[in-house]
Image (tube, rainbow, N blue to C red):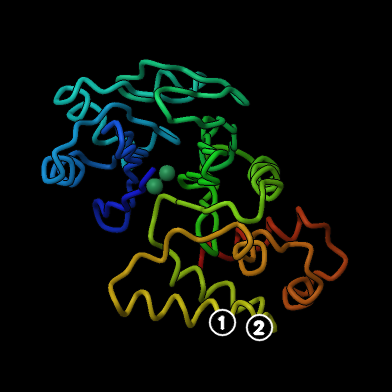
Amino acid sequence: MKIEVISCLKDNYSYLIIDEKIKKTCVIDPSESEPIINFLEKNNLKLNYILNTHHHYDHVGGNSELKKKYNSIVVGFKGDSKRIPEIDIMLEDGEIWKEENFEAKIIHIPGHTLGHICFYFYNENNLFTGDTLFSLGCGRIFEGTYEQMFLSLEKIKKLPPETKIYCGHEYTLQNSKFCITYDNKNKNLIKKIKEINEKIKDNQPTIPSTLKDELKNNIFLRSDDENIKTNLNISNSSSLETFSKLRDLKDNF
Ligand code: ZN
Ligand code: FE
């Protein structure tokens, strides 16, 4: 399986998973159809499946046109079936989606939206996290509670550390500035920021990250860290309280 990172809109990423042997493909979160079609045509491929992590327009914007052109099958969360355009296959939390050689577990991770899911391709250790977990950040909480978002990230934290993280946006550089502000003693983070700057300079995506890297560097996964709590002046707070404080600060960063 090959994964192609496709830049869409201003800073979105869609991902094409390509089974090169049998020429089957699926796309995760097509923000718009044009860049996806361009890639498919150039490589003489069709689009078999469309997978959506959540209903926001910058993740489903290409659904209708792509489905019309390729007769693709749209896959999404059952609880959000009214908000995912053109949905065909509705899945529940914990369910396995398996077609051809594609095989993913659906994990419900509410917070950014109530119907947000991620797709965990466990055979290849690839996780598509939409707008829940970013590299060095997490999504804004639009529909859920702080606790829901916190618990959703806790679910992701339990996956194998070698899991590769494919998220919905290129926000990594800006996220890194927030992380280092409150996690200033983190040597791993300083190293990661150097790598990020080099990739950005070379016009390369900073994605995928790995869960291992995120656990060490992403401040939203580190709300139990004592130095971070001290920097926030909330030494006796719980991890959830620390996470909530960080999310508030990031909203205005
Ligand atoms: Zn979103
Ligand atoms: Fe988004």
Image point (78%, 68%), residue name: 225
CB-based contact (under 8 Å), mark 1 and mark 2 = yes
- Which x, y percent locates residue 130? 46, 45
Q: Residues within 10 Å of mark 1 (few under 14, many from 20)?
A: few
On screen, residue 62 above or below 194 = above
Image point (55%, 72%), residue name: 178
Residue in the foreground of this view, choosing between 90 and 105: 105
Image point (61%, 58%), residue name: 247
Residue 230 is drawn in which quadrant? Answer: bottom right
Residue placed farthest to the right in the image?
236
Q: CA distance from mark 1 to mark 2?
A: 6 Å
- Which x, y percent locates residue 126? 51, 46
Residue type marked 1: Lys
**Left or right for 75, reference 16:** right
Residue denoted by label 1: 191
Residue type marked 2: Lys
Q: Which mark is residue 187?
A: 2
Q: Which mark is residue 14?
A: none
- Which x, y percent locates residue 195? 46, 78
On screen, residue 191 above or below 124 = below
**Mark 1 beta carbon near ligand 2 (under 8 Å):** no
Residue in the foreground of this view, choosing between 123 and 222: 123
Image point (66%, 62%), residue name: 215
Residue 200 is drawn in which quadrant? Answer: bottom left
**Mark 2 beta carbon near ligand 2 (under 8 Å):** no
Q: Secondary structure at mark 1?
A: helix
